[in-house]
Image (cartoon, rainbow, N blue to C red):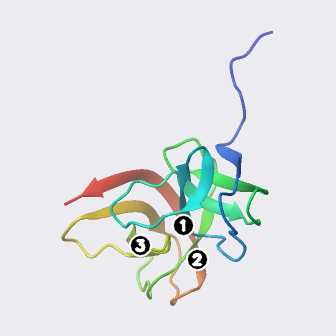
Amino acid sequence: MKTSLARPNAILSFEANADLTGYVGRFIVLTAGKAALLSSATVKPLGVLLCDGKAAERVSVALGAGGLAGTVRVKLAATVSTIGAYLQTTADGRVQTDVGTGARTLVAQALETGVTDELVEAILIAPQSLT
């Protein structure tokens, strides 16, 4: 029997473009085919960093556009006090509760509450740029 299924889960490995040690749970983009920390709250990220590494090492990324079978832990930029809150990216790859106005990118939904710099469980959604 032949199948066209390439992998059962949307977790991929990329070379890090810089030292990403300590950045697990933050959102990344691809720069020249390498994983780079998100640096703009209005850019759609590729996904969230699952395991970190130094420049030129391989890191794992859970893709945010769909295909991930499970949940992830995301790094908070501010307190999230409501389970189910939609989360938007910040300019350093962390997330916060959706502020509801202005240019922003929604990337996940919180499955637990937490405080700044904590990793909390979330479900990824396809990134949505809003204005």
Give the quadrant of residue 120.
bottom right
Q: CA distance from mark 3 to mark 2?
A: 19 Å
Provide the residue designation for mark 1. Answer: 122
Residue nearest the observer in this picture, 18 or 37? 18
**Contact check, label 1 and label 2, Cβ < 8 Å:** yes
Q: Is residue 118 left or right of residue 13?
A: left
User: Amino acid under label 1?
Assistant: Ala
Per the image, the residue denoted by label 3 is 91
Residue at the spot of label 2: 120
Helix, strand, or loop for circle 3?
Answer: loop
Q: In the picture shown, does residue 4 fall above or below 53? A: above
- Residue 4, percent from left and from top: 68, 18
C-alpha gap between disc 3 and disc 1: 19 Å
- Say whether disc 3 or disc 2 marks the residue closer to the N-terminus: 3
Q: Residue at x 70, y 77 (%)?
A: 22
- Mark 2, other Cα within 10 Å: few <14 / some 14–19 / many ≥20: some
Give coordinates of residue 76: x percent, y percent. Answer: 51, 80
Does residue 19 appear to the left or right of 37 in the view shown? right
Residue occupying image coordinates x 79% and y 57%? 57
Disc 3 packing (10 Å; few <14; some 14–19; many ≥20): some
